Image (cartoon, rainbow, N blue to C red):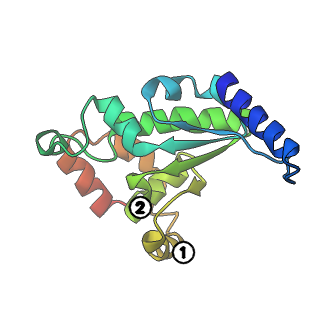
């Protein structure tokens, strides 16, 4: 943080020296949480910034100690692995406690079938590809909250990639 703020201050001094107008009071500072260690320290990190984005691709990779794109490994875990969801819950709880925005970024944010679970764990902000926006908007407009009463509890009962896939096809 000190390095970033030093660079930001230096850039501000240079802009003022060049007489370039900018809003130096309205700059929001945020972080990406992409490692399990950052997720575990989310509350402390959020106390120092204005918002957090969750880099779900890297967070999943580092959580499972598995490189993305490795076909042998990818067959063994679900993209929405329970360990990842538990880390998301930690980050979201920290966001609520510090009253800071938490945004989910990465591949999992593009799967509309996961939104009942995302909403139930408290996510409210998402970064998705423009091509997926309509599908996700449609899913949210047609979401049946009564059908999705306890998505998280049921999700955590799933133990294999097949059970997780079946859970989202049948229950959500």
- Indicate the quadrant where residue 59 lies: top left
| Upstream in sequence: badge 1 or badge 2 | 2
In the image, what residue occupies the spot 81% across and 45% down?
15
Q: Does residue 47 show up?
A: no
- State the image coordinates of residue 116 (x, y, percent, origin top left): 47, 58
Q: Nearer the viewer, mark 1 or mark 2?
A: 2
- State the image coordinates of residue 66 (x, y, percent, origin top left): 24, 33
Dot label at residue 110: 2
In this view, the residue in front, 4 or 50, is 4
Report the label total: 2
Q: Is residue 21 left or right of residue 28?
A: right
Q: Which residue is mark 1?
A: 141
In this view, the residue in front, 83 or 63, is 63
In the image, what residue occupies the spot 39% across and 53% down?
108
- State the image coordinates of residue 160 (x, y, percent, origin top left): 20, 41
Q: Is residue 25 left or right of residue 159?
A: right
Callout 2: few (<14), some (14-19), or many (20+) C-alpha neighbours within 10 Å? many
In this view, the residue in front, 24 or 43, is 24
Dot label at residue 104: none
Q: Is residue 74 left or right of residue 140?
A: left
Which image quadrant: the C terminus? bottom left
Q: Does residue 67 show up?
A: yes
Which image quadrant: the N terminus? top right
In this view, the residue in front, 25 or 92, is 25
The residue furthest left is 72
Numbered disc 1: secondary structure: helix
Q: How far separated are the C-alphas under marks 1 and 2?
A: 16 Å
Numbered disc 2: secondary structure: helix
In the image, what residue occupies the spot 87% across and 44% down?
16
């Amino acid at each position: 943080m000190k390095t970033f703020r030093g660079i930001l201050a230096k850039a501000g001094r240079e802009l003022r020296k060049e007489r370039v107008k900018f809003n130096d009071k309205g700059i929001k500072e945020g972080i990406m949480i992409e490692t399990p260690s950052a997720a575990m320290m989310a509350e402390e990190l959020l106390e120092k910034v204005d918002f957090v984005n969750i880099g779900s691709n890297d967070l999943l990779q580092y959580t499972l100690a598995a490189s993305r794109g490795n076909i042998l490994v990818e067959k063994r875990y679900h993209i929405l692995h329970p360990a990842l969801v538990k880390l998301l819950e930690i980050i979201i709880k920290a966001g609520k406690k510090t009253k800071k925005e938490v945004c989910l970024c990465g591949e999992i944010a593009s799967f509309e079938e996961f939104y009942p679970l995302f909403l139930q764990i408290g996510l409210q902000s998402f970064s998705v590809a423009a091509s997926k926006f309509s599908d996700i908007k449609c899913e949210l407009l047609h979401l049946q909250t009564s059908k999705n009463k306890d998505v998280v509890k049921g999700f955590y009962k799933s133990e294999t990639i097949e059970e997780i896939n079946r859970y989202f096809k049948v229950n959500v």
